Amino acid sequence: MEGSPAKPDAQRWAILAILLVVVFACLRFTHVRLLWADEDYHIAAALNILHRKVPYRDFWYDKPPLSALYYVLIGGHGGWLLRALDAAYVMTACGISYQMAKLWWGETEALISACVLSFFLAFYLPSAVIPFAADAVMLVPHLLAMYSAAAGRPFWAGVWAGIAFLANIKGAIVLAAAALWAFPQIALPVLGFMLPVALSAGVLYVLGGWPAYVEQVWRWGLLYASGSPVLHPWSNGLLRTVNWAGFHAALIVAGFFGFRRLRKTLQWKLGAWIVLSYAGVALGARFAPHYFLQLLPPVVLASSFGITRLVKTRSRIGILLIALALLVPFVRFGPRYVGLAWDDLRRVQPNWSDVLMDLDSQAVARQIRDRAASGDTLFVWGYRPDMYVYTRMVSDSRFWDSQPLTGVAADRHLYATTAIYGGPAAANRWELTRSRPTWVVDGLGLLNPRLAPGGYRELRDWLAHYRLVGRTKLSLIYRRND
């Protein structure tokens, strides 16, 4: 038995661990008045669904459907409901990590894995751990797939990998890891994987959204992945991996210590899971900080075993190294939660460069809400989906941001003009001119005048029907003349 024996005060330690998990998960409530990039996109997509629009067919959505459906659970709202949902999701992920560590080892390792996962889902770059976009929404089905595989249920491992795929195409990598663990019963996880994927494809086909799904998720997605704006992607990847490892040094040190003491069977399983998960991080050669969420579960599990071994052997040097390593992310990212909580209590806007665009969107929404009537519609030029969430409006066309209209992806349109989707974008602009939104917000032209909507001949007559009625530092607000 690799796990640690039960302790007389196990119940007290369990209560402490649960409290830590809850506290770390609830730190995201300090972001209650903010929306982060990507989560706002999926919340706005949920709003469209709640307006009885079919994804892909009735509105452009270049992600798999599960992230939008996740936010349907809270009616497409931000604020307290949003942060409560995300905190509950974090605690659910920690509970699955607990069960997996307990299955392999024992109660102590299980409690440590839950605490460590909750800690690192709080103390890292806010843009990576606060918004629940595709990588974060995939976390629970990812863990459930690997837990099912570890428990000898390969078919259910495939089902959960398929559900992960409906949040993020990197769910295919989860399937690869689960199938490798199930070898030679590879057919069972593959069959399980196909069940939710085929079911969702069938629903989209019946609703008339399948061709648009292929166009938006796969064609656009492949163009986006192949057109990385990073000049030196692999050196950038190495740098970002080192940065991630630095803030997660406690996991790296403990994981290395524990990995060497695992049974051979678990060594190759965890090793394969880690390697495949890092391949998911590297996919597309962007190495964005939130991509590393795919790597977090196996590293957390390896580290929980290592920490337990260090405690059991009373390795003072090892325990000290782990404690010092945990202080690094705590000291770096902890004060931000305190500052945001203090700002919330005083009802003042945070003075933080990372949220300037979100604060600008809130200012735009206030101006629109002050003048809006019931049934008004909105179109936002740029990539500012938070405006839809703050105004509770939707577009009256398939398009609600400028990416499919300019062909320039949002990860570069603040400074570049090179289109990756030029021909279809021109046709999409003509389609947009048949819409009559009440409000049009240009959230890009002041930041990159070369991509201002007035620069496209297809849109000039359409824009002539609108007059400027307001502005903020980063946005221009137009209202239809009639």
Image (tube, rainbow, N blue to C red):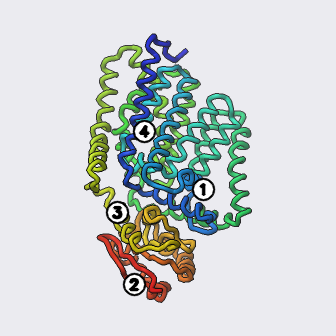
Amino acid found under the numbered disc labelled 2: Arg
User: Residue tagged by mark 4?
Assistant: 25
Q: Nearer the viewer, residue 414 or 222?
A: 414
Amino acid found under the numbered disc labelled 4: Ala
Left or right: residue 321 compared with residue 199: left
Cα distance between the residues tagged 4 and 3: 25 Å
Q: Nearer the viewer, residue 481 or 289?
A: 481
Amino acid found under the numbered disc labelled 1: Pro
Cα distance between the residues tagged 1 and 2: 36 Å
Task: Choose the circle earlier in sequence order: 3 or 2.
Answer: 3
Left or right: residue 208 compared with residue 60: right
In the image, is residue 19 above or below residue 455?
above
User: Residue tagged by mark 2?
Assistant: 467
Across and down, in percent, residue 403 comes to 48, 70
Task: Please tell me the numbered disc located at residue 274.
Answer: none
Task: Please tell me the numbered disc located at residue 65.
Answer: 1
Across and down, in percent, residue 152 comes to 67, 29
Q: Residue at x 41, y 15 (%)?
A: 312
Secondary element at image label 3 = helix
Q: Residue at x 33, y 75 (%)?
A: 471
Task: Choose the circle earlier in sequence order: 4 or 2.
Answer: 4
Q: Nearer the viewer, residue 93 or 228?
A: 93
Task: Please tell me the numbered disc located at residue 357.
Answer: 3
Secondary element at image label 2 = strand
Q: Residues within 10 Å of mark 4 (few under 14, many from 20)?
A: many
Left or right: residue 143 compared with residue 12: right
